[in-house]
Image (cartoon, rainbow, N blue to C red):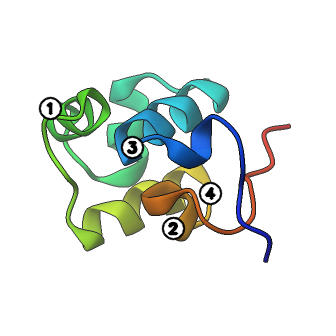
Amino acid sequence: MKPETGRLASLSVGVRLAEARERRGLTLQALSKQSGVGVATIFTIEKGTKQPRSDTVEKLARALAVPRAWLCFGDGEKPEWE
């Protein structure tokens, strides 16, 4: 796998999470329902005030259909948005 380059590669998990959620057309509430992660938790991760636990990242990555390594670190294949 080729590492991602550009804007999203250098940003935090919260920024990538918000980007993926918005690209998937999901609200905080919809992502919460799909992932089983609380709205407040997702919000604080997106704002950068909380770092997610590994099980939380796994749930969010599955719900968003993005690679876990990409969501955490910007590594690996870039998600397919369409």
Mark 4 Cα within 10 Å, few/some/many (few <14, many 20+)? some
Q: Earlier in the sequence, mark 3 or mark 4?
A: 3
Q: Which residue is mark 1?
A: 40
Q: Earlier in the sequence, mark 3 or mark 1?
A: 3
Tell me the SS state at disc 2.
helix
Residue shown at the point (53%, 69%) measured from the top left: 69
Q: Residue furthest right?
A: 82
The spot of residue 25 in percent (x, y) is 61, 24
Mark 3 Cα within 10 Å, few/some/many (few <14, many 20+)? some
Q: Quadrant of the N terminus?
A: bottom right
Instruction: Report whether 69 appears left or right of 55.
Output: right
Q: Amino acid at mark 3?
A: Ser
The spot of residue 75 in percent (x, y) is 60, 65
Q: Earlier in the sequence, mark 2 or mark 1?
A: 1
Mark 1 Cα within 10 Å, few/some/many (few <14, many 20+)? few
Front residue of 73/31: it is: 73
Return the mark for residue 12.
3
User: Mark 3, mark 4: which one is toward the viewer?
Assistant: 3
Q: CA distance from mark 4 to mark 1?
A: 21 Å
Q: Are marks 2 and 4 in contact (CB under 8 Å)?
A: yes
Q: Are marks 3 and 4 in contact (CB under 8 Å)?
A: no
Q: Which residue is mark 2?
A: 68
Q: Are marks 2 and 1 in contact (CB under 8 Å)?
A: no
Q: CA distance from mark 2 to mark 4?
A: 6 Å
Relative to 77, residue 43 above or below: above
Q: Amino acid at mark 2?
A: Arg
Return the mark for residue 66.
4
